Image (cartoon, rainbow, N blue to C red):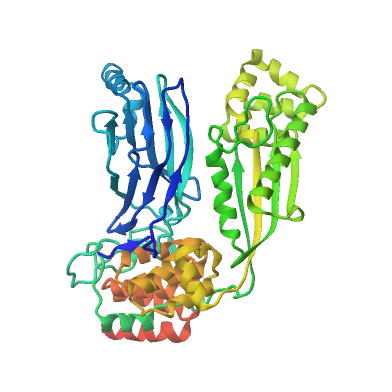
């Protein structure tokens, strides 16, 4: 099985983590380095390799540092890897005692550390080679690799920093299903489903389901194809042209940020509590735009919200100040012109509160919504909520809902220019989100159908355009030419109702050894792709006879 390297650069990427914390004069840490090595996919696992230089840490007897690699996806997916822990002698002894005496402690649910080091006993003078494999998931393709740093003294952990080791892993493709060494038969990989498929002919309607289409009944498995097989199926499958052009691309991305503020402060403190993680949400969007090689920022919209608790005037000032100060932070950090930033605020987000009530439906939902409908903001609305059912609902909203309303929403609009073939070949492994479907497909022309590189291009396209019929049909064609029928069915199942997918469903039935089922689909596809579908139909009809 091939190794899919996540980086095309042999130069080590160095992250220098510089921090200095003083807790009761017991802990200092300076000059540590975390160096990402090779990250690759093998079979169904992602292999992560790091080199940790931790010899610059001074740990007090009653303290501990936790260094936890974290993978963070674009849609808030997250996976924490086993931590490297450096503990003082007394801290390690106390933790062992707590684990033994308190089986219900939250720490009992944490995964086993990759390595636990006790200062003064096995403290590392040499670098730590961090190597681990985790089950691969598709969201990891464009995930960021972070390092979470925590400190523990007596009572729980405190987050020190959340630093970015790699902004994007940029996995070039979803790993193929594990192949057997040899496979001669052409099995059925289609799942049995009950959904109806309509076939209209001569004014009469025949209803097919997957269950009554003739099938082989063989066990699902990949198919090993010869070069001749690939050439034959390459003529039969459908590769559709994209519906978009090669011109300028307009993109919009957004993030919702929840900052922590020191008492009495409205400005952004990046290293305060969880703020670094929130800033990283914006960094993932704005970072690729800073070099101006391929994209140009068009508009940055920042809107601050406050929760309804407290005087309206104070909330209005707070929302306005925090959105304005965050806009200034981004303007200075990314050298954004003032004219490109639009700043607004909402003093009390009552609409957001209504949405939360309707989403979570606490027992007092209808009573609270009735008060919001009946009373205006300046006509005692908050007071009536505070008096509702003795004040318990208001206290619950303060705890559960109001923190979610105190936020800053960021919307980034940018334009991506048209790129040439050489640039597209670079971007598809680094920033595929900057490419159109046509530009991605132009890269595929460099590779032979049936090759892994050819498949990778089409799967990257389907990953970044998950709801696009063309992207899914074409990805199905590409993976079929590698013999991966299971992945092909996964792509086609998303778009099976679209007539443009019917020819490929027919080819897939044929590859499974099911020419009778293939003939049904080719007859349906004749009206969509007359020449290709008719040629395919004639072929399978000869096989059936």
Q: Nearer the viewer, residue 5 or 241?
A: 5
Left or right: residue 404 compared with residue 377: left
User: Does residue 246 sit above or below 29 in this rendering?
Assistant: below
User: Does residue 276 sit above or below 263 in this rendering?
Assistant: below
Q: Nearer the viewer, residue 331 or 482?
A: 331
- Quarter assignment of residue 501: bottom left
Left or right: residue 354 compared with residue 100: right
Q: Nearer the viewer, residue 2 or 437?
A: 2
- Quarter assignment of residue 33: top left
Which residue is farthest top? 390
> What percent of the width, then of the height, locates residue 88?
32, 25
Whether residue 206 is visible to the viewer of this picture, yes or no, is: no
Viewport quadrant of the C terminus: bottom left
Residue at image position (33%, 80%) is 233
Residue at image position (27%, 58%) is 43
> What percent of the width, then of the height, locates residue 140?
41, 53
Left or right: residue 367 compared with residue 26: right
> What percent of the width, then of the height, locates residue 157?
43, 27
User: Does residue 317 sit above or below 9 in this rendering?
Assistant: above
Residue at image position (63%, 29%) is 402
Residue at image position (38%, 71%) is 455
Viewport quadrant of the N terminus: bottom left
- Quarter assignment of residue 220: bottom left
Q: Nearer the viewer, residue 68 or 189?
A: 68
Whether residue 433 is visible to the viewer of this picture, yes or no, is: yes
Q: How many marks?
A: 0
> What percent of the width, then of the height, locates residue 173?
39, 63
């Amino acid at each position: 099985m091939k190794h899919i390297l996540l980086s095309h650069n042999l130069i080590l990427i160095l992250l220098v983590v510089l921090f200095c914390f003083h807790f009761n004069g017991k802990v200092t840490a300076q000059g540590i380095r975390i160096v990402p090595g090779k990250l690759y996919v093998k079979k169904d696992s992602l292999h992560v390799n790091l080199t940790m230089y931790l010899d610059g840490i001074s740990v007090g007897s009653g303290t501990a540092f936790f260094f936890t690699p974290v993978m963070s996806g674009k849609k808030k997916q997250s996976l924490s890897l086993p931590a490297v822990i450096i503990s003082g002698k007394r801290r390690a002894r106390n933790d062992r005692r707590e684990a033994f005496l308190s089986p219900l402690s939250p720490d009992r649910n944490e995964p086993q550390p990759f390595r636990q080091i006790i200062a003064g006993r096995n403290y590392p003078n040499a670098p730590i080679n961090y190597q681990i494999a985790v089950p691969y998931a598709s969201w990891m393709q464009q995930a960021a690799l972070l390092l979470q740093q925590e400190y523990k003294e007596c009572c729980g952990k405190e987050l020190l920093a959340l630093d970015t080791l790699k902004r994007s892993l940029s996995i070039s493709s979803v790993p193929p299903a594990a192949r057997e060494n040899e496979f001669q038969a052409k099995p059925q990989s289609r799942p049995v489903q009950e959904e109806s498929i309509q076939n209209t002919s001569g004014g009469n309607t025949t209803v097919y389901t997957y269950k009554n289409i003739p099938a082989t009944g063989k066990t699902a498995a990949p198919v090993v194809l010869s070069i001749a097989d690939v050439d034959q199926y390459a003529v039969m499958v459908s590769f559709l042209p994209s519906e978009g052009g090669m011109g300028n691309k307009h993109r919009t991305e957004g993030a919702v940020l929840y900052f922590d503020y020191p008492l009495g402060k409205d400005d952004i403190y990046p290293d305060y509590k969880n703020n670094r993680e929130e800033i990283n949400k914006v960094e993932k969007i704005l970072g690729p735009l800073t070099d101006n090689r391929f994209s140009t920022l068009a508009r940055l919209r920042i809107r601050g919200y406050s929760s309804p608790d407290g005087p309206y005037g104070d909330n209005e000032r707070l929302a306005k100040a925090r959105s304005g100060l965050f806009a200034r932070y981004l303007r200075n950090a990314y050298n954004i012109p003032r004219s490109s930033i639009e700043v607004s605020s909402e003093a009390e987000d009552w609409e957001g509160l209504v949405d939360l009530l309707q989403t979570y439906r606490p027992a007092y939902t209808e009573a609270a919504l009735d008060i919001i409908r009946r009373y205006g903001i300046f006509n005692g609305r908050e007071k009536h909520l505070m008096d509702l059912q003795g004040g318990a609902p208001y206290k619950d909203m303060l705890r559960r809902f109001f923190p979610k309303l105190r936020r800053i929403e960021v919307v980034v609009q940018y334009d991506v220019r048209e790129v040439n073939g050489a640039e597209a070949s670079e971007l598809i492994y680094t920033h595929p989100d900057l490419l159109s479907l046509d530009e991605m497909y132009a890269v595929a022309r460099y590779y032979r159908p049936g090759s892994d590189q050819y498949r990778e291009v089409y799967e990257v396209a389907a990953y970044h355009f998950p709801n696009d019929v063309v992207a899914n049909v074409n990805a199905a064609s590409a993976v079929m030419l590698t013999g991966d029928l299971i992945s092909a069915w996964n792509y086609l199942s998303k778009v099976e109702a679209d007539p443009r997918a019917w020819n490929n469903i027919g080819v897939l039935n044929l590859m499974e050894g099911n020419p009778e089922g293939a003939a049904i689909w080719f007859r349906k596809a004749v009206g969509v792709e007359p020449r290709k579908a008719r040629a395919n139909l004639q072929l399978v009809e000869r096989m059936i006879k």
